[in-house]
Image: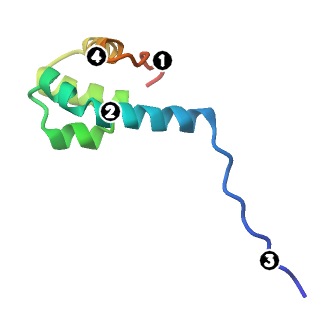
């Protein structure tokens, strides 16, 4: 008789931890982000989940910024709210 093995969940990775931190930061600072970028709707900001590449694309589209300009604004926002800038896209 064969026994079924219980599939184990993958171990949490450091990246998963930072993703959770980023999402928590984003939800806590959503109002500040909306004040900073008032051309973005709350729905836009929620949908971006604070992911730098998504937020950068929104800023480029709504504010006619270059990618570098958008990334710079995101990094300044993060620094002003005590979250280190994201090194990757």
User: Mark 2 and mark 4: span between their CA atoms?
Assistant: 11 Å
**Residue annotated with mark 1:** 87
**Residue annotated with mark 2:** 26
Q: Quadrant of residue 38?
A: top left
Q: Secondary structure at mark 1?
A: loop
Task: Examine the rendered structure and indicate whether residue 64 appears above or below residue 45.
Answer: above
User: Mark 2 and mark 3: span between their CA atoms?
Assistant: 41 Å
User: Mark 4 and mark 3: span between their CA atoms?
Assistant: 50 Å
Q: Secondary structure at mark 2?
A: helix
Q: Are marks 2 and 3 in contact (CB under 8 Å)?
A: no
Task: Examine the rendered structure and indicate whether residue 70 appears above or below residue 54.
Answer: above
Label 2 vs 3, first from the N-terminus:
3
**Residue annotated with mark 4:** 77
The quadrant in which the C terminus is found is top left
Q: Is residue 69 left or right of residue 25?
A: left
Label 2 vs 1, first from the N-terminus:
2
Task: Examine the rendered structure and indicate whether residue 19 appears above or below residue 36.
Answer: below
Q: Quadrant of residue 40?
A: top left
Q: Are marks 1 and 4 in contact (CB under 8 Å)?
A: no
**Residue annotated with mark 3:** 4
Label 4 vs 3, first from the N-terminus:
3
**Residue at position x 48%, y 22% from top?**
88
């Amino acid at each position: 008789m064969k026994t079924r093995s219980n599939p184990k969940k993958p171990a949490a990775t450091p990246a998963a931890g930072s993703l959770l931190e980023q999402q928590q930061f984003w939800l806590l600072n959503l109002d500040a982000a909306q004040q900073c970028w008032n051309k973005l709707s709350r729905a836009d900001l929620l949908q971006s989940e604070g992911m730098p590449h998504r937020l950068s694309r929104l800023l480029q589209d709504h504010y006619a910024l270059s990618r570098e300009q958008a990334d710079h604004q995101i990094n300044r926002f993060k620094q002003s709210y005590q979250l280190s800038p994201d090194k990757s896209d």
